[in-house]
Image (tube, rainbow, N blue to C red):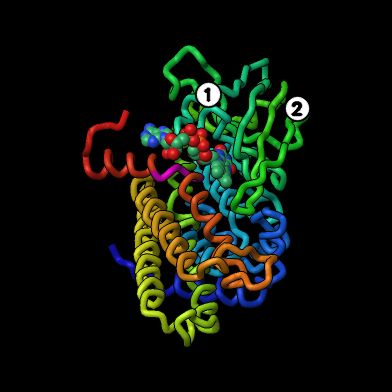
Amino acid sequence: MDFSLSPGAADFRDEVRAFLDAHLTDEIIATMHRTGTFNDKGFNGALADSGLLAGAVPGYGDRDPIELYVLFNELEKAGAPYDGLAVTMLVAGVINAVGTDFQREHVLAKLLTGRFNCCLGYSEPDHGSDVAAITTRAVRDGDQWVINGQKMWTTMAHESDWVILLTRTDPDVPKHKGLTMFLVPMDTPGIEVQPVPTMATERTNATFYDEARIGDEWRLGEVNGGWSVMGVALAFERGVMGGTNPAVPLLRHVRAWAGGAPSPDGGLMIDDPLLRERIARTAIANQVSQLLTLRAAWIAATGGLPGLEGSMAKLYATDRYQQAVGWFQQMAGADGLLDFDTDGAAADGWIDYDARHSPVTTIYGGTTEINRNNVAERHLGLPRAR
Ligand SMILES: Cc1cc2nc3c(=O)[nH]c(=O)nc-3n(C[C@H](O)[C@H](O)[C@H](O)COP(=O)(O)OP(=O)(O)OC[C@H]3O[C@@H](n4cnc5c(N)ncnc54)[C@H](O)[C@@H]3O)c2cc1C
């Protein structure tokens, strides 16, 4: 594969960087961490108005698909609120791949304005990794479907206009064969959203569906074909749309801190040989993460679904991120345990934040163990884990 960006993609990256210089303010970043909502509709709308969002829908239009990777990689490295946008564009890609004309007209067109959001309703309280075992029921009633059940970890549900909802439509067939996906308007009567705070500052939600009734026009894909729709969605989620360079902002904050913080041994922290080695190792890991991500993006750009390569990129990046922040917290001592709001916090609280955020990244979007199984079985040819 060719790791270099095409001239068009390189120009696009420059445009994204110029946009970030002009629009990403400290206030936007502070608000995202204060509220736990990693989404900013004004920022997303400005991105769309600048013409930078149209290329961000997987498989849509005639833009270079590598732009998808470029956009989210730059947003992530800059520390911008992009989680809500990434999920929304992921859903846009799924609609583009398997949606109907109605869904393109009524949803996809709106998502491209940056002013509407979608969320993912897969996980349930008792079914996360084994998501094919979910029990939320959708029962057909004429031209409508009636939905009952509960979802867990529906991040951005409180910001969203639609949820893509994985439901069970046939309980009497093997679990993967009885699932159907819907695109459910969040203002449907019978839907309730309850906040779930996390240690990582991000807010997520529990969502409840009580006799929620929608028309068949909101079905995404075939009846009992939900598992193949999941395959498309997961291939986009892992590796291509951010989440694989989380230690880049961390490293930027640590270097700024180390350049001014006194070392217990005299001089500055940046003079400490162990810290310098750890900074270098983290910079190398960041580069490897970027290349693994680019490989997944390149496969997507050439018509493939990078399920395996996305697993590799996500696994490596989140594992190294957790290791790096552990190192920096050790080096910072007690000051590395202080948060954004506490005077004297190392790196203005970013080390503490990343220490709380990094474990979560090894869970959502597929846990480390599940991704290791994926690599072991599909790449190394080892026996199935179960
Ligand atoms: C902050 C946050 C945001 C999230 N956002 C969303 C969202 O927007 N939408 C959504 O649908 N979901 C979301 N999730 C859910 C996430 O995808 C699940 O938490 C994840 O898939 C794990 O499922 P679980 O929590 O049920 O854990 P479990 O599946 O119960 O796993 C528990 C432990 O067992 C391990 N394990 C499970 N099965 C195996 C196996 N076969 N082999 C080896 N180890 C195994 C897991 O790796 C884990 O360590 C989010 C989660 C978090 C924490």
Tell me which residue sits at (40%, 53%) in the image. Answer: 300
- Say which of 308 and 89 sits in front: 308
Q: Is residue 48 left or right of residue 368?
A: right
Magenta highlight on residue 301: no
Give the magenta part as a residue range: 364-368
Majority secondary structure in the magenta region: loop
Distance between the Cα atoms at labels 2 and 1?
22 Å
Residue 89 position, x and y percent, is 57, 51
Quarter of the image where one finds residue 112: bottom right
CB-based contact (under 8 Å), mark 2 and mark 1:
no
- Label drawn at residue 190: 2
Other residues around mark 2 within 10 Å, as few (<14) / some (14–19) / many (≥20): some
Tell me which residue sits at (52%, 43%) in the image. Answer: 94
Tell me which residue sits at (58%, 59%) in the image. Answer: 54
Dot 2 or dot 1: first in sequence order is: 2
- Say which of 370 and 97 sits in front: 370
Q: How many marks?
A: 2
Other residues around mark 1 within 10 Å, as few (<14) / some (14–19) / many (≥20): some
The amino acid on which the numbered mark 1 sits, given as a three-letter code, is Val
Quarter of the image where one finds residue 9: bottom left
Q: Is residue 315 above or below residue 228?
A: below
Residue 207 position, x and y percent, is 67, 34
Q: Looking at mark 2, is its residue's CB closer than 8 Å to ligand 1?
A: no
- Residue matched to label 1: 223
Q: Work out which residue is located at the far front of the displayed protein and give it.
A: 265
Q: Is residue 230 above or below residue 339?
A: above
Q: Quadrant of the C terminus?
A: top left
Discs 2/1, front = 2
- Say which of 316 and 18 sits in front: 316
Whether residue 203 is visible: yes
Q: Looking at mark 1, is its residue's CB closer than 8 Å to ligand 1?
A: no
Residue 58 position, x and y percent, is 49, 52
